[in-house]
Amino acid sequence: MFSPQHLGATIMTAAQTTHSSTPSQVDAEKQCNAGPLRRSAFRALVQDFAPIWFTWCMNSGILSILTHQCPYQFPGLQIVSTVLYVFDLTLFILFSLLFILRFAIFKSLAYAEIVSNQTDLMFCACWPISWMTLTTLTPLICSNAYWGGHAFSLLGYVMWWVAVAWCLVVLTWAFGVMIEQHKASEARIPMPIILPAVSVSTAAVEGAFVVSLSYEISPRLAVPVIVVGFMLVGIGTLLGLILTTYLFHGYLAHGWHAPEQAASVFIFIGPMGQGAAALQQLGRAAQVYGAFAGYNKGTFLTAEAAVSVEASCTIIALMLSGLGFVWLIFSIYSMARCALRRELLWTPGWNAIIFPTGTLVSSMSLFALDMDSPAFRVTTALLIVILFIVYFINLAFTVWNVMKGRLLIVREDERIKERIRAMQKDK
């Protein structure tokens, strides 16, 4: 992670170095044979595009879902949800093209840079998670619109199966590379290591939303999603708990992260919130929306069993949400601690606040339905407002830093500068 101040100092130093280059520096740059020190805007955009940018799609998507399902509706809120959906879709297409272009243009170099960086490696899971927000919103908004219909429900259904395969491949690949190239040592395990597990839990909850809230999904289509969804909860949530143990041990052994990484603590919430929401919505799909009753086969896929399934899911979800709130308090304390010490800095890592917390809010909204609880409704609405405030704070800082050339399009190539310094040191 980095702060805008640090980036600004780095770029200023680079600019001064560029304008006062010595002959030896120019020779060293030519010998690097890896592109110019000061790149075109397009080259800088593509070459440095990192998977962390997909968190913008994730955050826009989760806020769109939350506003659509908010227990307190008012005129215009559905329009806000639709606008966020369109924004999510636009960003996903744009960022996907840039990410693919990076590999198409720079090939093995791009792949080597991704797998050699533990943080970028784990943030690759954000790509399928972004896809899954669209998987939910497409049938949720489009299939229920007057111009939509069953076709969009089937589109979301197919998109979900693609998402399941995608997130499982990323999970296997990311941890396979991690084990092979980044063996655990005394060094601290990066917080984003939990993201591949969160992606699998996300697939579970999004599948439950697809079969519950889409227009005219039959029990024959819904039941396979529910069954696979429960298996995905086991993979994502239980693996997330294991990884959370290692990450929390890092805090006990090494203390707090640096102030610019304070927001990364919110990642702890992800497996708990997503697991709780997945169980709740899968239980509701089985019982409230009648998937098991309509299927009616065996001893498990029946209307009688669905009642027990939903109750069991709610109880386990309450347990997971309780732990999720502990991590939320822990995360707020981390931010407040830095603020009181006047060390709190905005970084792109602040995007880690919205999606994990949003999963917990999604669980709260489902508790409000299950229990007809005013307390859960108020909590849900309040947290949605807070998440929107954080979203616009992130948007303002991001736009400002992009305009200043500190984010997204950084013309100075740090790779070349490092090679120049290394070659000069050798001489």
Image: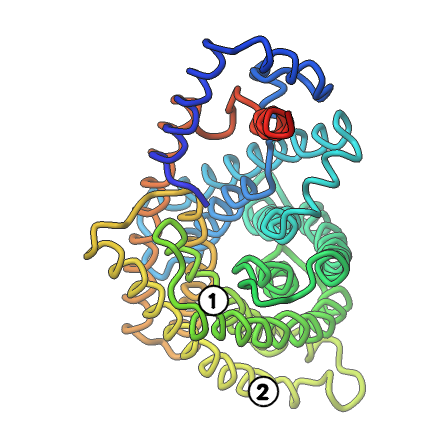
Other residues around mark 1 within 10 Å, as few (<14) / some (14–19) / many (≥20) = many
Does 105 sit left or right of 353 as displayed? right
- For the residue labelled by badge 1, is the local secondary structure a helix, a strand or a loop? helix
- For the residue labelled by badge 2, is the local secondary structure a helix, a strand or a loop? helix
Residue that mark 2 sits on: 307
- Judge depth for marks 2 and 1 and give the one in front: 1
Choose top left, top right, bottom left or bottom right for residue 271.
Answer: bottom right
User: Residue 392 location, x and y as percent?
Assistant: 34, 40
Residue depicted at x 58% and y 71%: 243
Does 117 sit left or right of 330 as displayed? right
**Rendered view: 37 above or below 97:** above
User: Residue 417 location, x and y as percent?
Assistant: 57, 25
Identified by mark 2, the residue type is Val
Residue depicted at x 69% and y 58%: 182
- How far separated are the C-alphas under marks 2 and 1? 31 Å
Residue 268 is marked as: 1
